[in-house]
Amino acid sequence: MTVSLPSAAPVAAGSGRSSVDAERWPDVARLPRARTLRTAIARRVVEHALARLPLRIRHSGAYGAVPVPRSAAGEDRSPTLTQHDPAAFHRRVGADGLIGFGESYMAGEWDSDDLVGVLTALAAHVDDLVPAPLRRLRGAWVRRRPAQDRNTLDGARDNIQRHYDLSNDLFALFLDPSLSYSSAVFDTLPATPRDFTAAQHRKIDRLLDLAGVGPRTRLLEIGTGWGELAIRAASRGADVLSITLSEEQRALARHRIADVGLTRQATVELCDYRQIEGRFDAVVSVEMIEAVGAEYWPAYFTALRRLLAPGGSVALQAITMPHERMLDTARTHTWISKYIFPGGLIPSPDALAQESAAAGLRITHDTGYGAHYAETLRLWRKRFLQQSEAVAALGFDHVFCRMWELYLAYSEAGFRAHYLDVRQLRLVSADPATEDSR
């Protein structure tokens, strides 16, 4: 098993695609079919776009060479994108757009001395990267999402397990001790590792407060994670039912709940939100709507309304993106949907408002914490890279490590560029007859 190198280091010189497991990573191990005209167009578009960004572009001269360090003070200190194999880079981008861009990184064909900086520059100028005439041809250029990624009852379970059932040990290597896999809310920024767990508890407590969770509250949590929210809610005296589609998460969450003696107060079940029956005083769901898929948002919000007892509240934490970008992403098979979150889609604030209203819910609280997610991701990525040998020891190869480094950096860049945001919302019944006065 090949051990991942530190951040900004390419795949070992001379190895390249030949070191990639072709059975596990077929589209990384081989280049897409050559399309001369498309590749030439991609090269011109990409070179023109990159030249207008606050970036430095380097060609390493030899595949696998280490990128050029940052310049001395007083010179250009823009982040550097180093192309080790420019021909392969442009061929992939020409064939598969941003999927090819990501696969080229996974193959070690490009690197950066500041990966987040490069990706932030790209995210901040995403609307200007492709000339307007070519943007109108987007439908002919990008791939559609695979039908098998739809979040049917069976599809949703498969999609969740492809990400969350990778390995509990893998997630434990880079998450804080609370095993919270969602944005923290820090007391001050920039954050430090010693503040991490307290910031995750602050996030959870704010959501529980929004939903009015206290003694004897009947609480439904949609999306268990590894059990920290259920534990904190049960510690308040609530009766908690937490549901997940991840067998790995359910097993560890149950173990952690038992360890603190709260099995009577908190139950974790393997169940889809569409299959839950009953009424609850509060419903909390943390960064789970992103996995639902736009096709099923009406079913998700209808379930929230159906499960909410009179006078109850829903507290959501959701990643969001601008509406027009969401519509473009919904029609596109992206690198994230191919490799990280199959079937997922980040909603826009407009979509959240429209879908919740259509289901009979009203938003009464809405607060954003985008800068806090950037810091959360920075801390996760730093620890993930520090644990590269431990990740490899779990059986994950260097391509996986580069894929996850890119995923974490890509996500952090989205928040730093304000392309993404994360919001905490409180929803109540839109029917005044069933709404409380809180």
Image: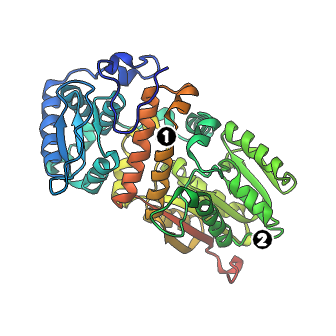
Whole-Å distance between the Cαs marked 1 and 2?
A: 39 Å
Name the residue located 64 percent from the left edge and 62 percent from the top edge.
201
Judging depth in this view, the residue of 271 and 432 nearest the camera is 271
- Give the image's coloring scheme: rainbow
Residue 217 in picture, x, y percent from top left: 79, 67
Work out which residue is located at the far front of the displayed protein and give it. 72
| Image coords of residue 254 (percent x, y) | 78, 45
Amino acid residing under circle 2: Gly
Query: Would residue 78 appear left or right of 251 to someone viewing this image?
Result: left
The residue at the far bottom in this view is 437
Q: Is residue 259 visible?
A: yes
Q: Who is closer to the viewer here, 293 or 320? A: 320
The answer, for residue 154, to whether it is visible in the render is: no
The answer to whether 280 appears left or right of 390 in the picture is right
Residue 362 position within the rendered picture, expressed as x and y whole percent measured from the top left: 57, 72
Quarter of the rendering containing residue 42: top left
Q: Residue at x 50, y 69 (%)?
A: 188
Residue indicated by mark 1: 386
Q: Quadrant of residue 14?
A: top left
Secondary element type, mark 2: loop
Percent x, y of residue 414: 37, 54
- Image vertical order of residue 142 relative to residue 290, above or below: above
The label shown at residue 59 is none
Q: Which residue is mark 2?
A: 214
Q: State the residue at coordinates (46%, 26%).
A: 3
In contact (CB < 8 Å): disc 1 and disc 2: no
Mark 1: give few (<14), some (14-19) or many (20+) Cα within 10 Å. some
Closer to viewer: mark 1 or mark 2? 1
**Callout 1 amino acid:** Gln
Q: Residues within 10 Å of mark 2 (few under 14, many from 20)?
A: some
